């Protein structure tokens, strides 16, 4: 029973294409995140949603658009892919208040832009 | 200067060794400190969670926080080959979901049998 699941695990695509990554959590959390981990393994927050509302939006190109249809899902759509978008993208979830802000991560989506 | 600095290693130790992993940070507002372990091609998983200064022990793992020096450590006793992974420190200023975690770059550890 995977707590935070992402699809696909691997994504290889050409520059200029549009692609989506899906994320689902079954932990009952109300907050979800997207992180980018570059080739140097540096993990950086991109977006955070709480109950379908955007609460963190770091400096990310507007080619990246997150969508949260409900609090258990947070998808990431990327337009006009560029070589520099190649990275591993991690989805995570946590409970917003009242407990430790412990984030649970998915296994990652390895994106390669050719 | 990055907010969180962590020596990326790699660090290679023999089985049974004591391992010391460290991070320094610049933001004095950080109060919550975490260590995540990330196996190859997997997502990070929480290993230790501490609040403010002090020590916390969990089995072979001990986390230390020295807020006066802006320095945190993770010690692994009797290291095992299964401890081979990348260890990431993370920290935040508030205990709520709208406060992002700031991660170090991670230290890659190999424990040789």
Image (cartoon, coloured by chain):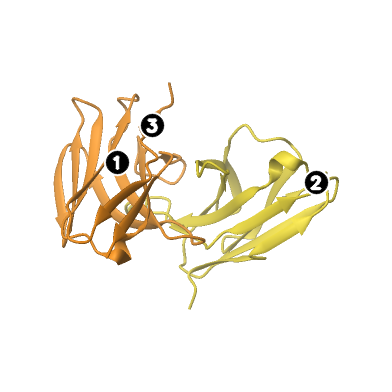
Shade representing chain A: yellow
In this picture, residue A61 sits left or right of residue A108: right
Chain displayed in orange? B
Q: CA distance from mark 2 to mark 1?
A: 35 Å
Helix, strand or loop status at disc 2: loop
Q: Nearer the viewer, mark 1 or mark 3?
A: 3
Asked whether the beta carbons under mark 2 and mark 1 sit within 8 Å of each other, the answer is: no
Give the labeled residue for mark 1: B32
Q: Position of residue A29 (x, y in %)?
A: 46, 61
Please name the residue that numbered disc 2 is placed on: A79
- Location of residue A80 by image quarter: top right
Q: CA distance from mark 1 to mark 3?
A: 13 Å
| Whole-number angstrom distance, CA of label 2 to CA of label 3 | 31 Å
Q: Residue at x 75, y 42 (%)?
A: A83
Q: Give coordinates of residue A70: x percent, y percent.
A: 62, 61
* Relative horizontal placement of residue A71, taking residue A14 as reference (left or right): left
The numbered disc on residue B4 is: 3
């Amino acid at each position: 029973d995977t707590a935070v699941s992402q699809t696909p695990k691997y994504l290889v695509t050409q520059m200029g294409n549009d692609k989506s990554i899906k994320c689902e959590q079954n932990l009952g959390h109300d907050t979800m995140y997207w992180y980018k981990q570059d080739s140097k393994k540096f993990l950086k927050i991109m977006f955070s949603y709480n109950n379908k509302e955007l609460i963190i939006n770091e400096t990310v190109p507007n080619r990246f658009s997150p969508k949260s249809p409900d609090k258990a899902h947070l998808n990431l759509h990327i337009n006009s892919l560029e070589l520099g978008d190649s990275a591993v993208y991690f989805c995570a979830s946590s409970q917003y208040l009242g407990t430790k802000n412990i984030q649970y991560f998915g296994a990652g989506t390895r994106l390669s832009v050719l | 200067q990055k907010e969180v600095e962590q020596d990326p290693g790699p660090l290679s130790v023999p089985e049974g060794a004591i391992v010391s992993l460290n991070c320094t940070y610049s933001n004095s507002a950080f109060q919550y400190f975490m260590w995540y372990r990330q196996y190859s091609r997997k997502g990070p998983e929480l290993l230790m969670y501490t609040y403010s200064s002090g020590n916390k022990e969990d089995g072979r793992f001990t986390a230390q926080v020295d807020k006066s020096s802006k320095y945190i450590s993770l010690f692994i006793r009797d290291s095992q080959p299964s401890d081979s992974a990348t260890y990431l420190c993370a920290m935040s200023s508030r205990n709520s979901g709208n406060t992002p975690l700031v991660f170090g770059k991670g230290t890659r550890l190999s424990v040789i049998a």
